[in-house]
Image: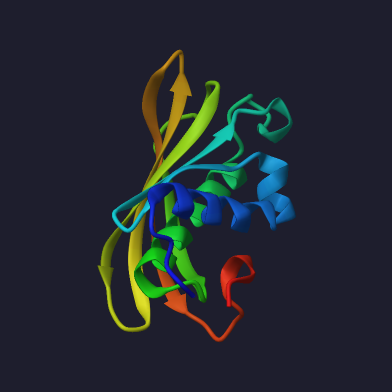
């Protein structure tokens, strides 16, 4: 695969990957930034995706974390990657207009990368940390994401 040359191309490619995943479309995931040094993914706060107290469901936050962690693994290792594992800590209830994940690479080897993401709830333009996640992303014998050659 030819690596995207600009951030705009990287964002467009990453968004095409999300657009090919029905679940990512369901939650409304949008890539705002994508580079080897970081990714920003946003999902709108949807009432249909809350839990019984009205907070964003933990599964939605975990989905957002998995997206950001895996995109950073792909930035480090190439497009044929899968999540091997991740853990998430929920640190406060997630309420607001949107959730934003900011991902980065902690370290990378030949076949795996350890990645991190913090998830923020956005309310009236202010971001509050609601969860943090660490993941291990591995190269895999699977077709590249987004149909890339």
Q: Position of residue 62 (x, y in %)?
A: 54, 50
Name the residue located 39 percent from the left edge and 49 percent from the top edge. 7
Above or below, 125 relative to 67: above
Which color mode does the image show?
rainbow
Which corner quadrant of the image does residue 127 belong to?
top left
Q: Residue at x 51, y 82 (%)?
A: 140
Residue found at the far top of this picture: 124
Asked where in the image residue 37 lies, by quadrant, the reply is bottom left
Residue at the front extreme, as displayed? 5
Task: In this rendered view, identify the residue nearer to me: 144 or 123.
Answer: 144
Q: Picture quarter containing residue 50? A: top right
Q: Position of residue 36 (x, y in %)?
A: 32, 58
Q: Position of residue 120 (x, y in %)?
A: 42, 33
The furthest residue to the bottom: 141
State left or right for residue 91 relative to residue 44.
Answer: left
Classify residue 57 as left or right of residue 90: right
Number of numbered discs present? 0
Image coords of residue 48 (percent x, y)? 74, 31
> What residue lies at 45% left-to-right and 13% top-to-bottom?
124
| Closer-to-camera residue (39/62) | 39
The image quadrant where one finds the C terminus is bottom right
The residue nearer to you, when weighing 96 against 29, is 29
Please tell me whether residue 34 is drawn above or below residue 50 in the rendered image.
below
x 60%, y 30%: residue: 44
């Amino acid at each position: 695969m030819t690596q995207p040359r600009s951030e705009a191309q990287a964002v467009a490619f990453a968004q095409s990957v999300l657009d090919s995943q029905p679940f990512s479309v369901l939650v409304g995931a949008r890539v705002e930034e994508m580079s080897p040094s970081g990714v920003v993914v946003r999902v709108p706060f949807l009432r249909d995706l809350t839990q019984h107290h009205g907070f964003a469901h933990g599964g939605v936050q975990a989905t957002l974390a998995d997206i950001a962690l895996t995109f950073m693994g792909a930035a480090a290792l190439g497009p044929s990657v899968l999540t091997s594992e991740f853990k998430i800590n929920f640190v406060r209830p997630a309420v607001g207009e949107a959730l934003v994940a900011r991902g980065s690479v902690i370290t990378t080897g030949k076949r795996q990368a350890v990645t991190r993401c913090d998830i923020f709830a956005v309310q009236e333009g202010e971001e509050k940390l609601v969860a943090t996640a660490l993941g291990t992303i591995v190269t895999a014998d699977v077709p590249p994401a987004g149909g890339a050659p």
